[in-house]
Amino acid sequence: MVSTKTKIGNYEFENCFMNAAGVCCYDREELEKVINSDAGSFVTKTATLNIREGNPLPRYYDTDLGCINSMGLPNLGFEYYLDYLLELQKTMPKRAFFFSLVGLSQEETHTLLKRVQESDFNGLTELNLSCPNVPGKPQIAYDLETTEKLLAEIFVYFKKPLGIKLPPYFDMVHFDQAAAVFNKFPLTFINCVNSIGNGLVINDETVVIKPKNGFGGIGGEYVKPTALANVHAFYQRLNSNIKIIGTGGVLTGRDAFEHILCGASMVQIGTTLHKEGPGAFRRITEELKVLMREKGYKTIEDFRGKLKYL
Ligand code: SIN
């Protein structure tokens, strides 16, 4: 029997696949589709304190090799997702889910995390430090000084399992510097990577999305090598108790296998889920299991992080 069960912190998941924040997670109806699929968990759309409409349309565009998007964090507000998560804790006590959130200011981030801390929520929180699409707001995790200060303040009061969603880094020195910061804190996980920020897709002579004159985050096939590099670079550098969620360019079971080989304990699916719908979880899980059987692996721990070098 081949199993794709996994563990993050003290939480066990029947399957290592879940959605990436932003896809199939805007409201209860979408999240229920993920719950009722073969996914092992879900993460909510990144919540801000108040409801946000997000950026003007069109703001998402599929291409042959992935997508470009500049959604701008449209969401139904913190309380909506917290209420739903608390309800699920009662109706599905054996399953654990992820609550993605970020404030539009550091003060708002503290307000949100303090509310999570005070609430009965007993799942995992994913702090999004990497959205490239809110005009005027930087991708926080590219500023490591700010990130370190923010995490230091957060861990004074936040005692529940916390992870951070990261943008891709592109330089070995930045992997070293970022890992040195993250290793100072009791993070339960990091999630690599959010979209590659501020790409540009052109159709004939015109951009394809409206916000920011066409600039937007790039996802899908384009990003797999960058995502794998980030997963593996952090796997090599982080304390082993900080688990890694691999996100980026997962179209097939083989792609997921590569993320796990690089060190991922869980794998998120974004662009492919958007293109194919929740049936993608079953297909990709089956493809991964076929590959594991061929290679004689029974669990994902048999090959996780065991990338071979020349
Ligand atoms: C968005 O809402 O713009 C995408 C979310 C993200 O990149 O974090």
Image: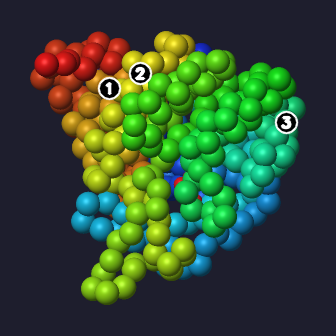
x and y, in percent, of residue 178 in the image: 54, 30
Residue 164 in sight from this viewpoint: yes
What residue did someone put label 1 on? 262
Which secondary structure, mark 1?
Answer: loop
Which residue: 32% across, 26% down? 262
Name the quadrant where ligand 1 sits.
bottom right
Q: Earlier in the sequence, mark 1 or mark 3?
A: 3
x and y, in percent, of residue 240 in the image: 49, 12
Name the mark nearer the viewer: 3 or 2: 2
Is residue 268 left or right of 107 when viewed as pictured? left
Q: Residues within 10 Å of mark 3 (few under 14, many from 20)?
A: some
**The residue under label 1 is which amino acid type?**
Cys
What residue did someone put label 3 on? 114
Q: Earlier in the sequence, mark 1 or mark 2?
A: 2
Q: Quadrant of residue 67?
A: bottom left
Which residue: 45% across, 18% down? 237
**The residue under label 2 is which amino acid type?**
Tyr
Q: Which mark is residue 213?
A: none
Q: Would you say the residues marked 1 and 2 are in contact, meaning their CB atoms lie under 8 Å apart?
A: yes
Q: Which mark is residue 235?
A: 2
Reply above or below: 38 against 309.
below
Residue 243 in sight from this viewpoint: no
